[in-house]
Amino acid sequence: MVISRATIAVTAAVAFAAAGTGAAFASDATSSTARATQECQPGTLKATTTQLGTEQAGMNHAGTFLKLTNTGNVTCVLSGYAGLALEGGGHTALPTQTEHGDTYFATDPGPHDVTLQAGDSAYADLVWTHTGADTAAAHYLQISPTGGNAHSTVPFEQDVDNGDLSVTAWSDTPPAV
């Protein structure tokens, strides 16, 4: 087969023009990958707390797992730490400070991409102390999956010292405690 200089020039010109306009030639596999890695949208995520059959209690520390389930029908990606806020009775805001990283019970996996197919869940470990020091009597917990304004509010009847919470990053498996 003989390829003329004209064929090479036309092929190069088309590729150059596509690159200059930002056009992309993607295969179906590439398009599927791009769709599968879209960021999770708060409206398709349901946050809850759960013990997962493991009690986290000791030395005035208590804990639970945060569970975030993709209730949408599209695979998405989540990364980072949950935004958290305590609420008192009547859903009044309570002063809350959240520390990201290791908790008393679990090692932080660090921020990384967690891919959630429809129905899949991500987990984080949530810990607080309850010695009675400037106790915040919480009734509810706001959980923002990505730290933004969109959040779920779940029952959380806990006494939390100084309103201080510790939480690990989201992971596709529950943190080992």
Image (cartoon, grey):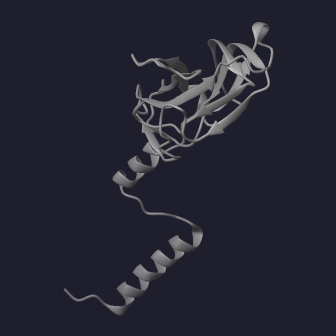
Quadrant location of the N terminus in the rendered image: bottom left
- Residue 41 visible, this orientation: yes
Of residue 18 and residue 61, the one placed in the foreground of this image is 61
Which residue is situated farthest in the front direction here?
A: 59
Residue 154 position, x and y percent, is 62, 15
Residue drawn at the location 41% of the way across and 19% of the way down: 54
Of residue 89 and residue 18, the one placed in the foreground of this image is 89
Side of 126 where 85 appears, left or right: right
The tally of labels here is 0
Placement of 24 over or under 170, stated as above or below: below
Quadrant location of the C terminus in the rendered image: top left
Residue 37 position, x and y percent, is 46, 45
Residue 103 position, x and y percent, is 55, 35
Q: Quadrant of residue 22?
A: bottom right
Placement of 106 over or under 14, stated as above or below: above
Residue 137 position, x and y percent, is 73, 12
